[in-house]
Each structure stands twice: as C-alpha cells, then as structure tokens.
Amino acid sequence: MSNKLLIIDGHSVAFRAFYALPPEAMTAPDGQSTTAVHGFINMLVKMLKDENPDYVAVAFDLSRQSFRTAEYPDYKGTRSETPPEFIGQVPLIQQILKQMRIMVLTKENYEADDILATLARRGKEAGFEVLVASGDRDTFQLVDSQVTVLWPGQKPSDVRHMTPQAVKDKYDVYPQRYPELAALVGEASDNLPGVPGVGPKTAAQWLNKYDGLDNLLAHVEEIGGKRGEALREHLDDVKRNRRLNRLVNDVELEVELSDLARKPINRAGLIELFDSLRFTTLRGRVLATDKQLQSDDTFAEEEPIAPEGDVAAQLPEVASARFDNDPKTLATWLKSAGTDGIAVYPLGDLNPSHPDIHTLALATRENALVIDLTEISERNEKTLANILRHRDDLVFYHAKPAMHAFSARGLVVGSVAFDIVLAAYLCNPDARSYELEDLVERFLGQVVEFAPESGMIDLSGGLDTAGRAAASLLLLRDALVPELEKRGATKLMNKLEIPISQVLFDMEARGIAISAPTLQEITQDLDHLVNEAQQAAFAAIEDDTVNLSSPKQLQEILFGRLDMPKTRKTKTGYTTNAEALKDLHARTGHPFLGALLEHRDKIKLRQTVEGLSRAVAEDGRIHTTFQQTVAATGRLSSTEPNLQNIPARTEAGLRIREAFVPGAGYDMLMTVDYSQIEMRIMAHLSDDKELIAAFNSGEDIHSSMAALVFQTTPDQVSGPQRSKIKAMSYGLVYGLSAFGLSNQLNIPVGEAKDLMKVYFSRFGGVKAYLDGVVEQARLDGYTETLFGRRRYLPDLMSNQRQLREMAERAALNAPIQGSAADLIKLAMLEVEKRLSEMGLSSRVLLQVHDELVLEVTDEEAAVVETQVREAMSGAMQLNVPLEVSVGTGANWRAAAH
DNA sequence: GCTGCCACGTA
DNA sequence: CGTACGTGGCAGCT
C-alpha cells in the first residue's frame, strides 16, 4: 500500500469550525472561545482515524499580506475584520498540534494554499496518495488521480471526498479547469469580481465548448448575447482572477517530506493542555489516534470514549472482511444467524432517483457482516436475494429508500419486520431528523459516530463501523419496541406505517406519466406571458432595471419612488404579497401593480412547470418521493418534486394538470377524493347532534349549517351566508380566532365575534369538543387521532404566550388533520389489497391528502371505481357517512371533478 | 455554500 | 393574530 500524505489548510478548516457553533458555545476557563479549536481538532482526529495517513502537515497563513495583495491590493478586501472570538484560537490549535507532534508550516508572503500545492506536488512525485483538507475551492485545481481534496461539511462526518469525478459532477469541468471557471465566475470571498451574469453553468459551458480558457479568450469575439458582451468588457478581470487563483507549487520550504512522518504524541503535554481547555471527550479521542498508529492495524477501532456500558461494547464483532473473497461467505454467515432478526443496512447513495449502494452491512445479535457489493460473488448475490425476498425478520434503518436502492440492483425486499426511522417518528413526530447517531444517543444513551451516512465509508480504516451501525439497529429495535408499546403506537406501526411504506414504495416506483409536448407548450405560453407582463411593468414605471422578483427592490419602487401607502410590516420591511398588492391596486389604480401581479402569477407557474420538466425521468414519468416522517400530524408530504401542490384553482394553473396523463397501457386517470373529510371527522369526534344531522340530511353541508345559524332553510341561504359559515367551519379546524375570521371575511371583529357566538350556540357539541381537546392535551401532554396517533405538545405549558397559543392551535388541528391522514392511509392499504387480489392492472399513483390519483384501463374502469369507492368509504366506521367522489379523464385536470 | 426570509402553491 | 407542508429567488453571511 502506498504512503499517504494528509495536508490541512489550518485557517480554512478552523474558520469553518468556528462558524459551525456560536462562539460562546465553548470556552476555556479564562473565557477564550474554543469552538474553532474544538471543531478543528475534532475534524483532525476524524481524518486521522478514517484515513490513517503516514505523513501529516498543517499549513497556516501568516498574515493577510502575500504576493497576491501586492499585485492586487483589494485581494480579499471584502473580508471583514477577523471576529474577536476567533483571534487567539489559532495559537491554541498550533500548541495542540505541537503536542501531537504534527508539523505546522507557514511561509512569509505566501498563503497556506500555496504550501498545500507545493506539498501536494512533492507528495505526488514521491508516489504518495495525497489528501488535501481545505474549505477553499482554489484547492480543487490540485485534484487528480493521486490527489483528493477533503471538503469539510457541517459536521466532521460530512467531509466530502472531492475526486476528479466529484469535481466534474459538481461543476461540469475537470479539476485542472476549475480555476478557469472560477476566474470567469469570480470569487466573492476573495473580492475577485467575475463576469457579471456569468455563473458556473455558463462558464462550464464555455470552457467545454472552447476547450479551456486560453482558447475561449482567443475566440472571445464569437460569443454572442449579453454574456458575450460582458465577457469582452471584463477580460482584464478574468485574466487577473486566473493569475491570482493559480496556486504556487514550488514554494521553498524548510522541510522534507520525511519530516512530516507521524510520530508518537506527547501524551503528558496533551493531557495537561486539554485539561486546561476543559476538553474532556476530545482528550480521549486524540490520545486514541496515537494507539492507532502504534498498533499498526488499519482495521483497529479506537477505544470507545464513554467509560462504561458503551454501545460499542454491546455490539458484536464483525465476522468477515469487507472484501467478500469467499464465494460462500453469506451462506456460512446465514447458518449462524438466529431468527431474532437480521439488520439490513445498505451504504452508498440512497437518493431514490439514482440510488447506488456499494456496501451492505448485515447484522444479527451474534455477529455482523460487511459485504462489498461491487465485487460480490454470484453465489453470494443469490443468497442475498433469497434473504431479502424471503426472510420475515428484516430490520431496516429506513426501509423505503433501501428498497429503492436494492431494486436498482434487481433485488426485491419481500417484507419489512421493523423500520427504525418510522418507529422513531411515531415516538416523536415533531423531531426534525432521525439520524442514526442521534437515535443511538437518544434511545441507547450512547454517543457514537458511525459516520458513513453519506455513503462515504472509507476502505482504508474503520472497516467495521458499517457492521456496528447495522448491529445497532437491532439494539435500537429492542429499545423502540417498548417505547412504541408505551405510547400505544404498536398497532399504528405494524398495521399502518410499515404497510403503507410498502405501498408508497410502489407508488414512487410507478411514477406518473407526463406529456412532454403539453409541458413544452405550457412553458412557451408562460414564457410569453411572463415577458409581456414584465414589459408592461417596466413601461408603467419607465424603468427596466428592476428585478421584479426582488421584494427589496419592489419596496424601493412602491414606497420610495411611487410613494404609495405603506403595507403591513414584515421583519425586513413592508410586505409586497399578492393580497397587499391587490389592495394597493384598488387604492391607487397604478398600472405597475396589475402588471406586477400578473408577472408574479405567471413566473410562479413557470417555475412549477420548469421543476416538473426537470423531474421527468428517462421513462417519461415523474417519480416523486413521499415523505412519511416529516408531517407531525401524520400526513404524507411529497418532495422532488412536490406533486401535492400542483395548481388547481386558476385556469393557467389547471393547464399544468393537463400534462399529467395515463402512461402506456393505460387509458385514463381517475381521481377519487373524500368530501369535506375534516368536517366529517370533526362531526364524529365531537358527536355534535346538529352537525351529524346536517351531514345525514344529504344537503349541501355549508348551506345546511348556515340555515341553522341564520335561522332559515337551506334553500333560502344566501351566497355570502354560506361563504361565512364555510370559512368559519374550516377556520375552526385550524384554531381560528375572531380576529382571524374578521380578517378572512373582511368584516369587523365584533361581527366575527357575534358570528362565532351564534355558530357555537347552534353547534354546542363542536364547541365542547374543541375546548375539551386542548384541556385534555394539557393534561396528557399529547393529542390523539382516531387510530391512536399521538402528537406531543410540550409548548402547551410554555410561559411564552405566543408559543403556548401556537401549541393550542396545533392541538385543535392535530386530531382532525391526523385522523384524516390515518383514514386515507387505511383506505390506501385497502385499495391496494383489492386491486392486487383481483389481479387488476390499474394502480394508485399519487396521494394528495384527501385524494388518490389512479392510472386505469378502459376495461377495468367500472370495477376499479366500485372497489375504490367501497375501500375508501369503508375505511373507518364513523357516525357520519364518508362521501367519496370519483372522476375520470384523459389527464389529471379532466379527471378532477 | 449556507441560511433566513418572503412569497406562494396544495390540502 | 388559522393548521400542515415544499420550492424557489433574493439577500446576507462567510
């Protein structure tokens, strides 16, 4: 194995660490902030452990002065003063490095980057594998087959390995050309302006077309358009940028590579230093890097930090090497696996649109196995396929993405016994993430770092972290099963969330077909309308330099230049939202406002259409991802793209729905939706006699309710009366106040209050229910849906009024919205069951909260409609009927009703 | 590059 | 000063 050299840009890594935390987060006893020190050392330890380099050096800038500032005095001129809390941290880092016996390098008149470049060159010449850790993009020019840049992320575990391919993927140019791209684009942090209007995309396009900057500049006259003009005007800037961003790789240094070899650390000195800084956990980790070196065992794990009962101690040994050389590894391992569950933990790219897993960690209670999927033997692949398809005790961290990843390799998961993420979500649906490390900490009480969430598991060291991560899944399940039981969520997990995740997997895999021509047509029309509106807006103010999408610039125009009356205040000024603009329009009649509103509307639609176009996969379909663990009420959400917010109201918006069509082999789309689902659930939960009677009457629900409130008959109810009651009813579900109602209906607060009073006097059960929900939630600490889904609302007890009132509204809404979510999930399971049992080819594609969209054949249309109606209206037995409406058509719009 | 804010689409 | 979401552009931070 070749030697490895790790070179670190000290300032840049420390600076990143500094901004990761507020400076007061960690301080030494003397008050000196130590966040940068801590972050830097943490990152260093992580790299030493993961990469196990043979040679290490850290380069620092000496001052801001360098040959670059001599040439261009404004270089880095926009950088503000170094924050006072950062000053003083660099010497501390250097002291620690000294005790770790890691060489610190500086050079008068040069930047740290130049030292990195010089050492990288020397390392390459010596045949080393070179790793350059830096947060400065200039270092990308060093990347080649021998040199990788380690690009720090938010956490130490987020380090990205910038290989030539990674740079190419990100910027569409190979590394040697990156500085040319940077010269064109400019670098704001170095105060190097580029060509205005030219971003990375344009720059890459040019460079690829002209095969490099030199040739591009030679043909600069050929480039048309505004950008070409801009380029010609800024040639000097580009040339200057290129001169300045070229790293010097022959800086004279006083050291030889051999001086950088790792040496045993000064343990006593380090302990003293760390104690004085109050670094307790880091101390152990830094000392452990020493052991790694001495034991000379690349697969050795460092000692766990936590002293006792550490998770690592409970985790089984890793049974096999990663490199799956033995064709029978899996079969042998499987024999020793009990029936208590197999944890399945794939590593690699789990992005559902292009999953690519390279490694698979499996674990039982006894042992773990890490398999390199890139060189798995045929026999093992077969065994694996069997395990995935037939075992009924598979435990996943998150099954749905894993299933997509397996599916991309032709592997089918037959059933899922447990899903850690889903369980954690049910335990606390308000959490914003369910990272494995965090769950281990929360449910097993241990701090661990498995790192390879990103799939960047490293081949050279820490081989068994993947195995340990897999093994931790079984321990987590042990911890989560009683937690679910305690929260009454076991049935929810087994009968609803796990089964629905399988349905969602199928829906995502199916996708929905898109008519490319329709989409294109819409784009063109919208482009035209956007331009027209823009021209009209510009004409109205005789100025075409305004960015109509910039609220800030709009404020200047509206309230400055045009001196219009001020609108509602926002944090950063005055609102320019549609409602306010309409109001201004009514008051001033200024043509700019009409044009602006038109522009807003159409540009937003264009964005939506563009997003959809980008999302069409090779199969001509859009495969959204349904998120099952983000909405705290139990609803699903849809991302990349969001197909749950496709416009449905305006004509222009509805045209977008025309682009959603049945795919090959199908004849129509069918939409099925629940009518007034939330109101019906409110009727059921509140058991309000009048409301239930209103639903049972078969009359229009809002007219029927309005008749009661206004003491007339349903057919005598006026339009405005009905609207008021409708707004009131829906508002209640959200915790609407009299103030909000008055605002919504544009009526005085007093009138709104009176309306609410009468409403509640007619629907006393509703009032009692809503009051009771909040009271009960305060007592229990949570609300509950019809299916027992809980939402915990600790803020109900907050002393801060705003937080408390927000929690109260959430408490009002959660049982209703959440029960509706339960209901349609149950319905989806029933629909899938019926369609598959009857061997129908028609299938569910989308869920939009109270609506399902199906792809249906002509022959099956009638039976599908019957089955889906039954399944949906019978999903739960409520004390009001569940009304379902069905529509079919040649596209989503036509299928609506 | 990341983050907060604004704006706006859906149920 | 009405719930639940996701996305995109701008602007400010580095």
Image (tube, coloured by chain):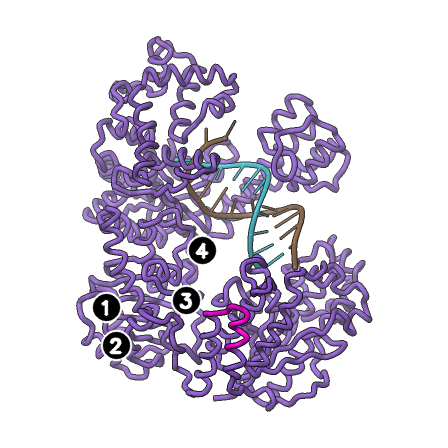
Chain colours: A purple, B cyan, C brown
Please state which amino acid type lies under the numbered disc 1. Answer: Ile
Of labels 2 and 1, earlier in sequence is: 2
**Mark 2–mark 4 distance (CA, rounded to whole Å):** 35 Å
Give the number of the disc on residue A356: 3
Of labels 3 and 2, earlier in sequence is: 2
User: Magenta span: helix, strand or loop, mainly?
Assistant: helix
Tell me the residue that label 4 is attached to. A617
User: Circles 3 and 1: CB distance less than 8 Å?
Assistant: no
Magenta region, residue range: A271-280
**Mark 4–mark 3 distance (CA, rounded to whole Å):** 16 Å
Tell me the residue that label 1 is attached to. A387
**Mark 3–mark 2 distance (CA, rounded to whole Å):** 21 Å
Q: Secondary structure at mark 3?
A: strand
Q: Chain of mark 2?
A: A
Give the number of the disc on residue A330: 2
Location of residue A634 by image quarter: top left
